[in-house]
Amino acid sequence: MSNKKRHKLRNLDPHFEREKERYGHPLPSREFILKTLKEQGIPITEQVLQILLKITEEENEIFSRRLSAMMREGQIMCNRKGDIYVVEKLDFIKGKIQGHADGFGFLIPDDGSPDLFLSSKEMHKVLHGDSVMVRVIGIDRRGRKEGTIVEVLERVITQLVGRLRVHYGILFVEAENKRISQDILVPKEESMDARAGQVVTVEIIQQPRENAQPIGRIVEILGDYTAPGMEIEIALRKHDLPYQFPHEVEMLSAKFPNKVMKKDLAGREKICHLPLVTIDGETARDFDDAVYCERDGKGYKLYVAIADVSHYVRPNDALDKAALNRGNSVYFPRRVIPMLPEVLSNGLCSLNPQVERLCMVCKMNINADGDFYDYRFYPAVMRSHVRFTYTKVAAMLSDPRGEDARQHAKIMPHIQLLYKLFKVLLQARERRGAIDFETIETQMIFNNLGKIEQILPVKRNDAHRLIEECMLVANVCASDFLQKHKQPTVYRIHEGPTPEKLDALRNFLKEFGLQLGGGDKPRAQDYARTLVKIKDRPDAQLLQTVMLRSLRQAVYSPDNTGHFGLAYESYTHFTSPIRRYPDLLVHRAIKAALNGTTYSPGDWHELGKHCSQTERRADEASRDVESWLKCFYMQDRIGECFCGVISSVTGFGLFIALDGVYVEGLVHISELPKDYFHFDAVKHMLIGERSGRHYRLGDRMRVKIVRVDLETSKIDFVPAGKNE
């Protein structure tokens, strides 16, 4: 075949120019390969496809790799005879496996179509998270579409953490992730002599098949289940959290100086004279932000200085890849898995007191009504004058003549001015109609053995809110700046309720004689007005909880749809680049706009999805650890009675949040007084069929602890008698 004919054929590929830009030796595009396969009308072999596309002998290997990638992504599949099929012509559905603890599972389709039920028999072929191709085979007895797995496209899980068990001499690992119901068989010679009951990491050496269980080898013995800190070690591996930095990152980190170098000051404004201060929690070690305020006529001039992480973490270097992989820092009780190595997160990038630090400044002019009318972003070098805690600032504000205030007499006027600005910003927030749900956060107090001694509520004071409002306005300015410069970025978006959730909320509120304004498209201020109406009612907590659950989760996306909860038309995250990767992206985008260029890190949609996923992963891991610690805390209190409130109602029972100890457990539906109870999802209620007795979200209940299961992190209650 002459080069001339081959080039002529390749030029028929509408995506040939794109392929030329990406690759030095361009191959037919995926789109052209699919078009060619469809035109044949029947499945064909790879050899025939190579002839049709004029693939040379030198191109064979790389062409085969392209076909393999298309198979992994579910665009094509190959049968045992070697015939290649176009998947979309086969009525197969591609998606990911979601396992269930009871053995069955679901296919979550990539195209967003309804989930498909997979029986326990089908689930024997795969593990939770695998990417597969499924064919619909009918409807199960509960009316759900049911599928059968046609092909496994990608095996996701190669290692997992669990407990080593022994049964009649057979060793197996029971996965900590209860979505993986298959036990992993372990040959004795692959056990590292681990003892039954120990927590281990197992590497899967043979994936599950229809008639064979997965087989693995133990690669790490973590130790006894109740050892101090084990709950975190398990969570790290269960949720696949990166907890060790690659060698390349360690090498790069070792090259950083311990202070800002003179060469780094070029092109920066020096603002070391400004009495900027950091205000954080007592245990904080990474300080992202510093603030300072001064009068500007009747208004204010607010400086928010943010650590300039982007100066040290360059696009696509080892640090950047590791930070992207982590997505964010993960906070556990008594331990942090940082997004960046400590030399940066606690050192060179942290705005520690009395040392020079590189920063990105957002200088804002805010009028007497709390609206910004001008702002400027610029790189600078700063010096934090004081490291304050929320507790200390709150004490200074409540007692301006007290010891804390006298100790910082020079800074005190600036703190008081910040507080005045905060009051103005708070009024602007109320006018804007932002939603302000009241939630209770808790803090665990540990003993020397690393176990909970006490769980205490953490009250947000005005110092917390002061910093929050300053960060909000800086984030809004960052979003506005990037929009004006037409610079792509990831926004922090929060959409309003879905039509289904909105309808359920309105029906629920009707039961209480309440209405939510705004028609089919309520705004945040409609929610805020309803919250004001109910705040003094005895059932306020119930109503607020249902309203909160009607809203969607905030995510990162390049599509700016606004932030419903905060009532902003445009919002992004700029203020925490040490611990959140989206903020680092925003800093780079701002710098690019300042320099008249465009920052292009790749597919912004994929970056938004990835950062949203790592945020959820971190939340789930933190919840797992807290749940286990709370179970350990309560295991010695079996038989004790507590008062609490129904925090959730399900078809299988009631979840009760205990007063004072801030621990949650389940009253199973079978433990309720003799009757058949039915779940009313709209009213968030269980109703007795004969008695008419009901249990509703927010109701008070007295319960007795009857079981604490450390392995599943669950606590079981039963209703307590009057005399208990």
Image (cartoon, grey):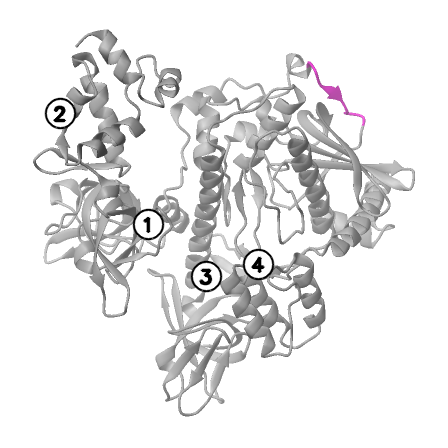
Does 135 appear above or below 201?
below
Q: Quadrant for the N terminus, please.
A: top left
Kind of residue at badge 3: Lys
Provide the residue span drawn in magenta.
Answer: 266-273
Neighbour tally class for label 2: few under 14, some 14-19, many 20 plus, Cα within 10 Å: few
In percent of the image, x 36 and y 47: which residue is there?
111
Query: At numbered mark 4, what does the secondary structure look like: helix, strand or loop?
Result: strand
In percent of the image, x 19 and y 19: which residue is there?
61
Looking at the image, how many numbered discs can be counted on the residues?
Answer: 4
The answer to whether the residues at label 1 and label 2 have Cβ atoms under 8 Å apart is no
Magenta segment main secondary structure: loop
Where is residue 285? Give x, y as percent.
Answer: 60, 38
Q: Earlier in the sequence, mark 3 or mark 2?
A: 2
The answer to which of 56 and 438 lies nearer the viewer is 56
Report, in whole angstroms, how far the alpha carbon at label 1 lies from the one at label 2: 32 Å
Q: Earlier in the sequence, mark 1 or mark 2?
A: 2
The answer to which of 216 and 500 lies nearer the viewer is 500
Q: Label for residue 414?
A: none
Query: At numbered mark 3, what does the secondary structure look like: helix, strand or loop?
Result: helix
The answer to which of 412 and 612 lies nearer the viewer is 612
Name the front one of labels 4 and 1.
1
Where is residue 202? Give x, y as percent.
Answer: 24, 43
The answer to whether the residues at label 4 and label 3 have Cβ atoms under 8 Å apart is no
Q: Label for residue 442?
A: 4
Kind of residue at badge 1: Pro
Q: Is residue 680 visible?
A: yes
Query: At numbered mark 2, what does the secondary structure look like: helix, strand or loop?
Result: helix
Q: Which residue is mark 3?
A: 630
Q: Which residue is mark 1?
A: 109
Report, in whole angstroms, how far the alpha carbon at label 4 lies from the one at label 2: 65 Å
Q: Which residue is mark 2?
A: 48
Kind of residue at badge 4: Thr
